[in-house]
Amino acid sequence: MSSTPDLFSLPDDDAQQRRAQELRRLLQYHAHRYYVLDAPEIPDAEYDRLFRELQAIEAAHPDWVTPDSPTQRVGGKALEQFASVRHAVPMLSIRTETDTESSGALNFDARVRKELGLTESDPPVEYVAELKFDGLAMNLRYVDGVLVQAATRGDGESGEDVTQNIRTISQIPLRLPAHAPPVLEVRGEVYMRRDDFETLNETQRQRIAAGAKGEKTFVNPRNAAAGAVRQLDPAIAAQRPLSFFAYGVGELTPSEQGGPAWSTHFELLRTLKDWGFPVAQQMRVLRGANELGAYHQEIAATRDQLPYDIDGVVYKVNELALQRQLGFVTREPRWAVAHKFPAQEQLTTVQAIEVQVGRTGKLTPVAKLAPVFVGGVTVTNATLHNELEARRKDVRVGDTVIVRRAGDVIPEVVGVLPEKRIPGAQPFTMPTHCPVCGSAALREEGEADHRCSGGLFCSAQRKQSILHFAQRRAVEVEGLGDKLVDQLVDSGVVNTLPDLYRLGFVHLASMERMAEKSAKNILDALEKSKETTLPRFLFGLGIRHVGESTAKALARHFGQLDRIMQASEEQLSQVADVGPVVAHSIRTFFDQPHNVEVVEQLRACGVHWPEGEPSEVALQPLAGKTFVITGTLPTLSRDQAKDLLEAAGAKVAGSVSKKTHYVVAGSEAGSKLDKALELGVQVLDEAALRQLLDAG
Ligand code: IVH
C-alpha cells in the first residue's frame, strides 16, 4: 500500500478525489489495526499525517466528505466480544496544534480571545495546562459513589465495556467519598509506565523463547496498554501493569445539595485528586499565550525524564462558564487544544546493513537508513547492536522500519512493517569473517558480540585505536580525524601509535586533499600532544574496560605508569572501582610484549607526563580488605566505624559473602553474623577492630 501522494501528478480534481478515497481506505485499515487488533503498522505520526492530508482535501471540497470518512468519527469500532456502551456524554476529541514552536499557543489564545470578543486591553485569559498522556481515553462511571462501568472511547459515541480489566488498576478508586454526586463520570487516560512496559516485554520475550504460542512483544507502551485494556481474559489483564491519570469529567448529576459547585477546571481536578484519582503534578494554572508557550517548552525539554510517554501538552480554558460560552465546533471543543511535540518515531527504509569493526574488534551490524527527521535530528544510521538483536528484530535490507529517537538516546529501530517487506529479502546473518581484514569472526561462549580475531592485524581495529588515542579526552591530537587516519593506515604509513610521531611533513603533505598548512597543523598538534597526563595516556591506550574514570583511579593509586605495568591482578584490584575482570584485562594487556613495546616507543618519541607518588590509599593498612558491620558496637556508631575503616583503606559492604574478609559484630547482630559463621569469615568485636586499626 502506497502512502505518499504522487508529487508529480497534476492536482486535478479527479486525482484528488482518488487520493481522498485512497486515504480513507488507508486510514480505515490502520485504525482497524490499531484499535481493534492492537497491532499498528505505522507510527502515530504517520497516521496523523495521512489524517491531516485527508482533512485538507475535504476542507477544500466539503461536498466530497462521505459519512463514513474517518474524519467524521473519532476512533475504531468496539470489539464484538466486549459489550458496547453508549456514552451518556460523547467523548470528544481535541483540536491539535502540530507546529512545535510556541506559535501553537499563540494561535490557540488568539482564537479563544476572538471568540470571547476580547480586545487587547482585556486581561489575559486563564488556562489550565496539562500533559498530553500517550495512552487511551477511558470513561469511569460512578453511581452512588461506586465504580459501575469503565468504557473506552470507541468512536466517541459508543465504546467498549472494559470494566473488569479497569478494575484491576489499583490507582483507580472503586468507591468515592460519601459526598460525591449520585452520578459522576471521571475521564482520563489509561497508560503504561515505561519501566512497566520494559518488564512486560522482557516477560513476553521469555515466554516466546520458552515456546509459548500466541504471545508477542509490544512496540511501545501505548500499544501495550491498549492490548491490556482489550485483553478478554481479565486474569491476564491483571498481570499487565496499567496506570491512570484523570483529566476531566463526563456525565454529572449534582447531589441534592447542588454540589459539586466547581467554577473552574482547576477546582474540578483538585477535587478529583482529593477523591483519590491520580492527577499529574505538572498540571498548572497559567495566564496568556506566553505562559502557555513557556510551559510547552519546559515540558518538551523534560519529557524524557518522565516515567511515562507524553506526546504534547493540553491547554484548557480554566473558567467553566467561559468553556460553556465557547462551546464546540463539530466534535472538538473550542476551549481546549492539544499542542504536540515533535514525533519521536518515524518510518523509513533500510538501504543496507553494514558490519562495523570497533577498536576492540567488536562487530556491530548497523542499519543504513534513508535519511529521516526524527526526535529533532536527521537520522541515517541505527545500530542493531549484535546478531541476536538484529535477528530478534528481524531487520532486512529493503524493509520499512519504525525508527525512534528520544532525547539524546541513540536512534534505534523499534520494529519492522512485515507487510511492506520486499519478496526475497534475506534475514541478516553475521559474517563468519571480519569484513575488513578477513580474519575469523568469533563469538565467545556466553557473549553476545562477535569479534574480529585479527587484533592489530586488522586495519579497522588499528584505525579505531589511533582515533581513540588521538581523541580529545585522551592525548588529543587536534585535526587527526577519521578521513586522515584512513589514509595514513591504508597507505601503510602508520601502523602503530608511535608511527604517528614519526610522521614527517613530506608524508603528511603527500596525503590526498592535504594542504601544506594542514600538514603543518597536524605536526604541531602531534608535538603538542606529547605533553600529556598519566590518566589521559592510560585511557588512550584503549585497554579493555579501562574508561576515563578507571584510568584516573589507577593513576591516582599508583602514581607511575611502571608501577601499573608491573602490578599483579591482586594489587590492581585494590584500586577503587577495579574488580577482577578489569584487573585481569589490565594485566593481560601489559603481558603482551607488543603492547609494552608500543608504550616504550611512545615514551622514546617524547610522549611524557608528570609522574607522582602512589596515593596514600595504596599504603593504607587495610587496603583491599572488605568489612561488614552488624549489630550495635559498645562505643562506636556504625558510621564512625565505617569512617575509620574507610580511612584505613578498607571497603565496607552491606552483605556478607565469600569475599568478605572480616565481620565486625556488636550486640544483637543477626543474620549477617550467622552468615559469617557459616562461611567461616573472621568475626571481630570492637576491641579487636581497634587493635587491627592501631596495628596499621
Ligand atoms: S481532554 C474535551 N486532556 O488526547 C477534551 N485529553 O483528542 C477531551 N489526552 O484521546 C480530552 N491527555 O485521551 C484531555 N490532559 C489531557 C489529555 C487528553 C491525553 C488524550 C485523550 C484523547 C486525546 C484528545
Image (cartoon, rainbow, N blue to C red):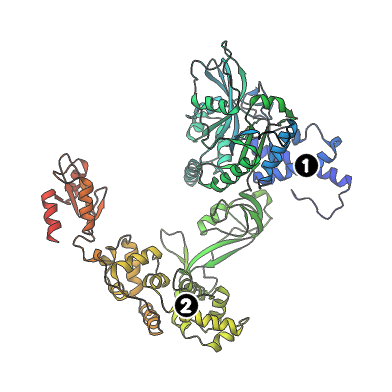
Mark 2 vs mark 1: in front: 1
Query: Residue 7 location, x and y as percent?
Result: 81, 54
Query: Residue 622 location, x and y as percent?
Result: 20, 60
Q: Is residue 513 visible?
A: yes
- The amino acid pointed to by label 1 is Leu
Query: Residue 411 location, x and y as percent?
Result: 57, 55
The residue positioned 43% from the left and 79% from the top of the image is 530
Is 477 placed left or right of 394 in the picture? left
Image height of 396 relative to 672, above or below: below
Residue density around tag 1, few if under 14, some if 14–19, many if 20 or more, within 10 Å: many
In terms of secondary structure, where does tag 1 sit? helix
Identify the mark at residue 457; answer none if there is no mark: 2
Q: Is residue 398 visible?
A: no
List the single residue furthest toward the bottom.
506
Query: Residue 135 location, x and y as percent?
Result: 58, 37
Q: Quadrant of ligand 1?
A: top right
- The amino acid pointed to by label 2 is Phe
Is 95 placed left or right of 515 in the picture? right
In terms of secondary structure, where does tag 2 sit? helix
The residue positioned 59% from the left and 22% from the top of the image is 262
Identify the mark at residue 54; answer none if there is no mark: 1
Pointer 2 residue Cβ closer than 8 Å to ligand 1? no
